[in-house]
Image (cartoon, grey):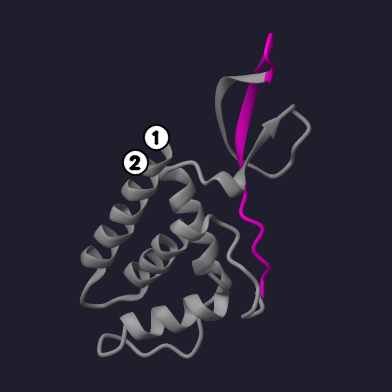
Amino acid sequence: MTYGEADNFIKLFLKGDITIASISSTYFKMAVMEVSTLCIPSTLKAEYDGTQTDVFRLLHFEDVVVSPTVTKNVQFYIKKPPIADTPIGTDEIPIDETLALAVVFYICSYLSNKYKDRFEAKANKQISVYVSNELS
């Protein structure tokens, strides 16, 4: 999902609740980080070797199959979301496509006057669906 599409969704979902001219990149950073706290987005997951400076949170070690007879114990981490201070509307939100709607719903929950809980519940449901699909 692009920032422009997300912006349009947010304005549509908040119509009749609050009027917004534009969505700050800070909201996108907050929402992506919140999603990344509750699950492990594959687009932000990377191998950790101790030299990274973009660490949002460290993950557990995993055995990774290198070849049919060799496995390697690797630690992974979640990268801080690379969101520009002024994202361009055609740029993609740096998160899995299936989690982009959770980002939209979290931003709606931050901004809404009437439906904060409803939007947060929708975001959490999107994350639950993502996690269940990843585990299956």
Proximity of marks 2 and 1: CB atoms separated by less than 8 Å = yes
Q: Residue 31: percent from the left, percent from the top?
A: 46, 60
- Tell me where the magenta segment starts and ends, as one range: 66-86
Q: Amino acid at mark 1?
A: Leu
Vertical placement of residue 26 versus 98, above or below: below
Q: Is residue 118 above or below residue 57?
A: below
- Of 92 and 66, which appears nearest the observer? 66
Q: Position of residue 42 (x, y in %)?
A: 56, 44
Residue 39 falls in which quadrant of the image? top left
- Is 37 part of what is drawn in magenta? no
Q: Position of residue 46 (x, y in %)?
A: 66, 38
Q: Which mark is residue 132?
A: 2
The residue under label 1 is 135
Left or right of 131: which side holds 89?
A: right
Indicate whether residue 67 is drawn in magenta.
Answer: yes
Q: Which residue appears at 41% of the width and 79% of the height?
A: 9
Specify the quadrant of the image occupied by residue 103. bottom left
Q: Nearer the viewer, residue 41 or 70?
A: 70
Instruction: Check disc 1 and report its element: helix, strand or loop.
Output: helix
